[in-house]
Structure formats: C-alpha cells, structure tokens
Amino acid sequence: MIKEDHRSENQTDPATSEDTEADTVRRQARLTLAGQARDADELKMLLEMLGLHPSQEGES
C-alpha cells in the first residue's frame, strides 16, 4: 500500500508554476518581436495586437 506521506515538501504549486511559465513565454515573445520590429511604433502595434503589451498584463 502506498502512503500519501511520500510527497516531497518542496513541491511547488502547479498554478504558480504555470504562471511562471506563462510569464516566461510572454517575455520571450516580446523579445522576439523587439528583434523583428522595424521601429518602436511597429513594435508597440505588434505587442498590442498580440496582447503582449506590458499595459495589458493580466488581461486575457
């Protein structure tokens, strides 16, 4: 019989892990767009279109 006590106390909350992963993906997407945009206006437009603009944090 397997006991429930076998779990590690260092396990992270899955929701927190997903949030961290989502933040990492958003950051990578922003950096990719920054490298491809021709100028600041185009970058701003692309970020807003894709919902990646920092002012849109938390919106989905």
Image (spheres, rainbow, N blue to C red):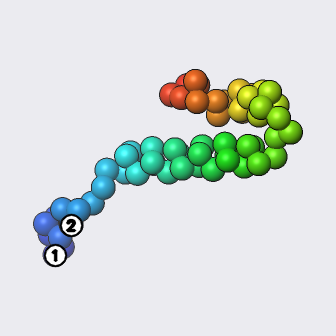
- Judged left or right of residue 8, residue 25 is right
Viewer-proximal residue among 59 and 33:
33
Looking at the rendered structure, the kind of residue marked 1 is: Met
Residue 60 seen by the camera: no
Quarter-wise, where is residue 52 in the image?
top right
- Judged left or right of residue 45, residue 13 is left
Residue 48 seen by the camera: yes
Looking at the rendered structure, the kind of residue marked 2 is: Ser
Q: Are marks 1 and 2 in contact (CB under 8 Å)?
A: no
Q: Could you tell me which quadrant the N terminus lies in?
A: bottom left
**Residue drawn at x 77%, y 32% as measured from the top left:** 40
Q: Which mark is residue 33?
A: none
Image location (x, y in percent) of residue 19 = 45, 44
Quarter-wise, where is residue 10 in the image?
bottom left
Viewer-proximal residue among 48 and 1:
48
Residue on which the image places disc 1: 1
* Mark 1 residue crowding within 10 angstroms, few (<14) / some (14–19) / many (20+): few
Q: With respect to residue 1, does 40 lie above or below?
A: above
Q: Secondary structure at mark 2?
A: loop
Viewer-proximal residue among 55 and 2:
55
Residue extending furthest toward the right: 38
Residue on which the image places disc 2: 8
Image location (x, y in percent) of residue 16 = 37, 46
* Mark 2 residue crowding within 10 angstroms, few (<14) / some (14–19) / many (20+): few
Image location (x, y in percent) of residue 34 = 73, 43
**Residue drawn at x 51%, y 28% as measured from the top left:** 58
- Judged left or right of residue 41, residue 20 is left
**Residue drawn at x 63%, y 50% as measured from the top left:** 28
Q: Secondary structure at mark 1?
A: loop
CA–CA distance between discs 1 and 2?
A: 18 Å
- Judged left or right of residue 32, residue 15 is left
